[in-house]
Amino acid sequence: MAMERAFDEVDVSTLAFWELSAEERDARLAVLRAKRPVSWQRPAEGMATLPGREDPGYWAVTRHAEVMTVSRDPETYSSSNGFQIEDVPEEILESAGSFLGMDHPRHTKLRRLVSVAFTPRRVRALEDKIAFRAKTLVDDLLERGEGDFVDVVAKPMPSATFAEMMGVAEEDRERVTGLANDMVAWNDPDVLDGRDGLTLLLETLVGLYGEAATLSDARRAQPADDILTGLVTAEVDGEHLTDEEIAAFFVLLSVAANDTTRQSISHGMRALCRFPDQRELLASDLDRYLPGAVEEIVRWATPVMTFRRTATRDAELNGTKIAADDKVVMFYVSANRDETVFPEPWRFDITREPAHVGFGGGGPHFCLGASLARSMLRSMFRELVSRAPTLELGEPSFLIGNFIQGISSMPYRV
Amino acid sequence: MGLFRDAQDVYDSIGRIFQEAISDPEIGPKTKEAGLTIRFDFKDPDSIIYVDFARGDVFFGDAAPERDPAIKLAMKADDANKFWLGKLNLVMAMAKGQVRAKGSVPEMLKMLPLAKPLYARYEAQLRAQGREDLIQAAG
């Protein structure tokens, strides 16, 4: 049972907090990292929570070390009782989360079934296309001369990669990407446009399920050489994925693909513009510096800011007693600025030793798409840095929310 | 042809589980507190169930009140049977157009968890009524 506890004076639960700039937010998180790395917080505000729901609060885990500990101890910190900082209704989570919201053995079984579809040959074919796409996207960027960096470069790269994996037709890509982008924007007034967050979540879910059902039926009738065909035919120990399992994975993947790498590309380009010395260093020897730059971009961007677990038993985290059933939220956004791991964390430095938790802190839920994400970022920045040396960016507009660290739009000029 | 003989057959099976929910000492007070009104328009056979959780009333067919409910759901009676047996994924059913919903999504999401504990009871009720056919047909 959760006991009555006082909420920390540094409040990281309000939407007003998440509306602050990343630097302003981190000034508060830095206090927690230094003084109370595991702090008790009042329930997170947000539009994905049912009104009137009882919620005692949650533990905010803000340092790198404890984020790693929680990530790597799934027996104590379960994923099956919600994975968002907000108390999103179970019906939504189950439909949207796939194995992200499961523990062993369901998680292991489902993840294995899905992995069967990701054969090395299919992944290699995707990577070849990624390199080619990066070239054509930068061709387009240069030809236009100016425009919205997000629309021209950051969004199309992961959108097309996801579409190819799932066999989404060219004419449906924008719509599907739009659904995936809107799905994570339940706290953004512009995207909500008068709707409540739960309505937005259900509408986008239903849209993505419809797409998944149509595509799965088509692949069953006529198999193709793509990952979706692999998913409808995958078999482990005589078990297949159900339509609902495929649809839930489709949703998970659409969000994981479209809402993360897109942000890393935007934040990464912005960082290279704000730190011209690093851009110069990277350009001086791409082969040498690119792998480190990609890791630093993921740290810098931290597209997924928070994920939550629930304690299955009493535990202790950095001397703080966690009770069974307590919610525990990992602040990747804070862990990736932990000054004890990343000296001068607000300096963008492509020569750092990579230690970020941008793909999670290890353990069974480590990002399944990490190598594809790295591949997209490598190809994209190889082209951008070598072929668009005069590219300049204007002020971005940021997505509002407590989940994805997003840039909605950002003007560019070459 | 669906699984149910006629509208009365729907009311005796699906209608009854709503009455059970309302009179249940544990679930009843929660549904009352949620205070929702839902109207179900079923096809195959054409039938209507109108539930006023706040007042604890279930109306069938022509007896359904005129006033607009908070939520309107339209589906085949067979799919409603599947839902009450825990065999219908609502999001997928909505995506495929099997279930059409109108009204407040937050209100609907508030009610759904209350239905879960009733799946087993619906199944037991069907068995008691000698309607194993409805259970088997749901897969």
Image (spheres, rainbow, N blue to C red):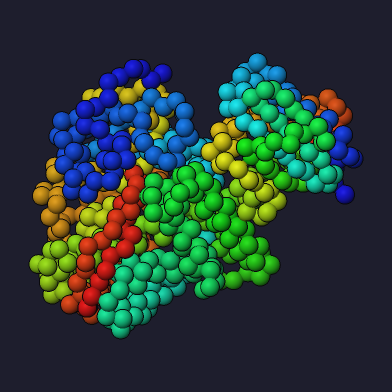
Residue drawn at (57%, 41%) of the image:
B104
Tell me which corner region of the image, top left, top right, bottom left or bottom right, holds residue A386: bottom left
Residue drawn at (36%, 69%) of the image:
A151
Residue A242 in view (yes/no)? no
Q: Is residue A138 left or right of residue B95?
A: left
Tell me which corner region of the image, top left, top right, bottom left or bottom right, holds residue A76: top left
Which quarter of the figure is the N terminus of chain A placed in? top left
Residue found farthest to the front? B66
Residue drawn at (83%, 25%) of the image:
B128
Q: Is residue A116 above or below residue A331?
A: below
Which quarter of the figure is the C terminus of chain A placed in? bottom left
Query: Residue B98: image x %, image y %?
Result: 70, 51
Q: Is residue A225 left or right of residue A288?
A: right
Query: Residue B127: image x %, image y %?
Result: 82, 28
Camera-side residue of B108 and A180: B108
In this figure, what is the number of numbered marks? Answer: 0
Residue A270 in view (yes/no)? yes
Q: Is residue A398 left or right of residue A344?
A: right
Query: Residue A354: image x %, image y %?
Result: 21, 54
Query: Residue A240: image x %, image y %?
Result: 62, 52
Camera-side residue of A400 and B96: A400
Residue drawn at (38%, 72%) of the image:
A130
Residue found farthest to the bottom? A143
